[in-house]
Each structure stands twice: as C-alpha cells, then as structure tokens.
Amino acid sequence: MAIPAPDPLHQHGLPTAGIRRRLASLLYRRQTLLLLLLLTPPLLWFGVVYLGSLLALLMQSFYTFDDFTMAVTPELTLANFRAIADPANPLFGANIDIVLRTLGMAAAVTVACALIAFPIAYYMARYARGWQKGFFYIAVMAPMWASYIVKAYSWTVILAKGGIVYWLVQALGLNAVLEAVLSLPVVGGSSLSTSNLGRFMVFTYIWLPFMILPIQAALERVPLSLLQASSDLGARPAQTFRTVMLPLAFPGVVAGSIFTFSLTLGDFIVPQLVGPSGLFIGNYVYTMQGAVGNIPMAAAFTVVPVLLISLYLALARRLGAFDAL
Amino acid sequence: MHSEARAPLWLKLLAYGGLAFLHFPIVVIALYAFNTEESAYSFPLQGFTLDWFAAAFGRDDVLAAIWLSVKVAAVATLASLLLGTMAAAALYRRRFWGKEALTLMLILPIALPGIITGIALLSAFKLLAWEPSFWTIAIGHATFCVVVVYNNVIARFRRSSHSLVEASMDLGADGFTTFRHVVLPQLATALLAGGLLAFALSFDEIIVTTFTAGHERTLPIWLLNQLGRPRDVPITNVVALTVMLITMVPVIAAWKLTQGTEAVAGSGK
C-alpha cells in the first residue's frame, strides 16, 4: 500500500497559510519587489550609515579648529589641507615628513613581501600536490587570520633585549654584525625593537600572507599548455619563467601589493609598539582626534592615505591586478 | 608546470622556510605562555609552569574583556549573516543599475584603512550624540564583517543551480518552503563558514574598535593596554595565546567546511 507523501501544498492547512502563500507568490512573480526587500537593509546600513559617516568625516575636514580654545567650529576652511599640501605653510614640513615616512615604509614592506611570498606561492601553485596543497593553504591561512595584536605583541617579545633574536645573534657570534646594522643611519636605532629595521620586520611578517595568496591564485591560473608550448619552442626553463610565467603572475603580485601597501599606510598599532618615535599617518590621525581633539585636521589627514591608495588602485587596475583578485 | 617534475631543492627550502617564518611568532607566544619568568622576555626560557593560566582566568578584568569580545563578535556575526546573505541573494543573479557601486560599498570597509572607518564612525556617533558603548562597537564590527559572509554566500549561490529552485516551485512548493528546504541546505556550510570567519574577524579587531569602544575594553584593547605593563607579562602571555587560538580555530574550521563544495548539488548544470 502506498503511503501518501506529505504534500507541500496542503502541509500547512492553517488559515495563515493562505496569506503566506499569497505573499510567497507575490514575491516570486514580482522579482523586483523581492530584490528591493532584500536590498533595503544592506543599502541602509552601507549607503546611509557607512557612506554617510565617511561623507560626514570628509565634511569635517573643512571645519575650523581654534588652537587657543581647542574648539571646532563649522566654518569652512581649507587650512587643514594647506597644512598638508602647501609648501609655504609652516606645518607643511612636519606633515610631509609623516607622509613620506609612512609611504617609504609601505613601499619597502611591499617589495619585501613580494620577494618572500613569490617562492612560497610558486611552490604552492606548481609543486604542492595532494595533501601538501591543503597543508600549505592552511599553513598560510592560519597565521593570516591569527590575531593581529597578538602577532604584533609576539614580535615585541622576539625582538626584546635578552630575547630570542639577541640570544640567537649571540649564539652565532654575530654581535658585531648586529651592531653594525643598527648603527646604519635610516634602518638602525639603539636596539632592534626601537629601530626601523625592527618595525619593517614586523610589518613584513604581518602582511606577508596577504601577498602569498593572490600570487598563488594567479600562478594557479597559468595554463600548463602555455608553459609546454614555450619549452617546445625551445625556451630554457629560466626563459620560460621570465617571459611566460612572470608576466602572467605579475597581476597577482600587484593584487597582493594593494593589501600590503594599503594596510601599512593605515596602521597605527605596529608603529606604536616597535620602532623609533617618528609618527606614521595613522598615529598622527589617532593623536589628532584623541589627545588633541583636532578632528578637522585628523579628518583632512585621512584623505592622504585614501588618495594614495586610490592612485595606487588606478595604477594596479592598469596593470591588470583586478583580474587576479 | 611540471606536475610530474620535482621542485628544485632551493625552492623547497624557500617555501618551507617561508612557512616556518609565518609560524615562528605563533610558536613563540605558545612557549612564553608556559614560562615561569615574571617580568622579562629572556631566552632561553626559565622554566615550565601552568600557574599563569589559573591566574589569568581568575582575573575579573580578563574575564570581562573576553565576555565583551564574545558578545560583540556574536552580535556582529548575526548582523553580518543577515545583511551579507541578503546582499548576496540580491546581487548574484540580477543585473541592475548601481550593482557595481553596491559591491564596492560592501568591500570598502576592509579596503579602506581601518583608521578611516573607525574615525568616520566615531564622528558620526558623535554627531548623533551616541555615547560609545557595546552597540557602537558591534555596529563598527558588523560593517566590516558583512563582506566576509557576502563573499562566502555569493560564491555558493554562483555554484549552485537555479534550476533546483525552479524544480521545487514546479512541484508546488512556495517561495518560503523552497527557501527552507532547497536554498538553505545548499547555503548551510557557506553560512557557517562565513559566520565563523566573521566571528574571528570581529573577535580580533582592534583598529576600528579603539575609536568606537570609548571606555569599554574588548580583549584586543585589553591586550594593547597591557603591553605597557611589564609586571603583568605572564598574564598577558596567557591571554595572547588564548586570543591566538580563538582566532585561528574558526578559520581552520571554515576551511574544512568549504572543502569540496565545488560539487554542490546541481552545480554541473
């Protein structure tokens, strides 16, 4: 005997089912209505709350800050931007130093990340097979997601005087080398944890996974046949690498560099924990809005990383990085 | 390239060396959490003890910070699951004016430096005369967590076949029943994975939080404040290890969950 299967049509034999069903078919027939219903909450959140906040911030960058009363008044002025962009302004020198210091670090970190990431990504994409693939992926993902503040903290432990790096340097008898490096003008400092070298190492470490994964993704997409064709046509492996592989992997490098560059530009925790005392853009913005209470100046300064990143993104787009994301 | 060939030794060394570099600071934190030394970071380690775990988890400020972070992450995760799924459902099949702009808007909170999102939200809260509180932290976190859920869910939507939905409708199920019995099971692991990632992202966030938290102290902020206090080193080490584990485990779980989902039912069509 056949048991009647529950029929979804009559499963909900309650009076409310009629309304529910009418509503359901209304939404199915009027896809635009459904779309609107689905889109309204995210649109309200992002279009109104978030974008509104960003615009309010931009607006405030034109407000006036009174140095004597420490009060912000909504009188529009370009003074904040002049302090960043006008060489005749007395604040220009100090401000441009902050920008250049941050930019220099972001560039150095990006190059270092690309150099370290490439061999890892290359191995992952081209040689890792079977269990190794999953292993490498997790081994890159886990440190990438592991707590940012703990990773930064861990480096202060590693670089501390009497800590692991100093112990290792001593054990290998490299004291003289370390001292020589630390006495160099720009990279050096009184100790590893107060030198630009130390800060550079921490930044490079923290953003490295953000460089590995896009390069790996770009390399994965290079078709095998292209490389075979190259070698069939007589190219040596090194030639194939340089003329076929590298150009195809380059958008991946650019995609990764967007992360390393932009993340370094906006960071204010690492510069606070490791390295010499000169301010970064992030630290400057943070002190301006917090301790000083000069929100207009802080707001104007946030335009700097946004502009730099937009320029960088425009460049990256021309280099084809967005296809590799 | 050479799926049959073996990697040259130098490349293998560089690759595994890179992995070792990535894990080295994590191992260091794990080791120092068991160290007996109280006020410095000297190496080799002084001795092994489990006492600091009891001490750390007996401290009210630590427990309060953990609890606050868990609550914020839970609320932010829920909000981003809702918003992210709605946005993904709306955007994956239809083309309409402003779609690109909307996608960009979802990505913006993680593409822009956190300091900008933080200060923008803070100044907006000030304009609205909202005091920084639990809710302002949660709103900030949800803003940058949505994209994680969105990415996971839209990827799953794209791989699953719409004909299953049509089949369900043809067989007489209405939109809600179809959602409940066809769409939701397909999305389940993507939602779980996205939710886990959002939780990890929120639990660890510090840059936006420093702006929106006011006097509240989430666990990362507690840690940051702690870094200037040499006498609490052992407690800090234990909490650091805890935070590290809480942020790493969800990521590994999320990866496991989305393994092999290229073959979702109906994706071949």
Image: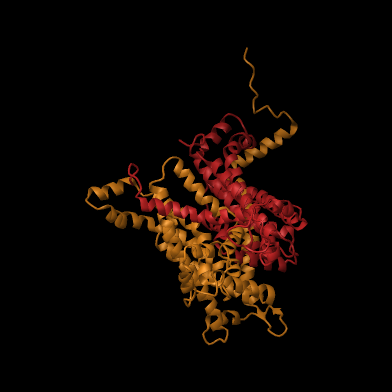
Q: A9 or A238, which lies in front?
A: A238
Is residue A229 shown left or right of residue B194?
Answer: left
- The percent coordinates of residue A113 (x first, y second) are 46, 61
Residue extending furthest top? A1
Q: What is the quadrant of the N terminus of chain A in the image?
A: top right
When asked about the image quadrant of residue B110, the answer is: bottom right
- The percent coordinates of residue B76 (x first, y second) are 67, 52
Say how many tags the image has: 0
Is residue A156 shown left or right of residue B61?
Answer: left
Chain painted in orange in the figure: A
Chain painted in red in the figure: B
Is residue A182 shown left or right of residue A295?
Answer: left
Q: Residue drawn at (41%, 61%), measured in percent from left and top?
A: A115
Q: B93 or A117, which lies in front?
A: A117
Q: A251 or B166, which lies in front?
A: A251
Can you see residue B85?
no
B178 in relation to B206, above or below: above
Residue extending furthest right? B60
Colour mapping: by chain
- The percent coordinates of residue A295 (x first, y second) are 66, 74
Can you see residue B235?
yes
Q: A196 or B50, which lies in front?
A: B50
A80 in relation to A5, above or below: below
Q: Residue drawn at (43%, 59%), measured in percent from left and top?
A: A116
- The percent coordinates of residue A242 (x first, y second) are 31, 57
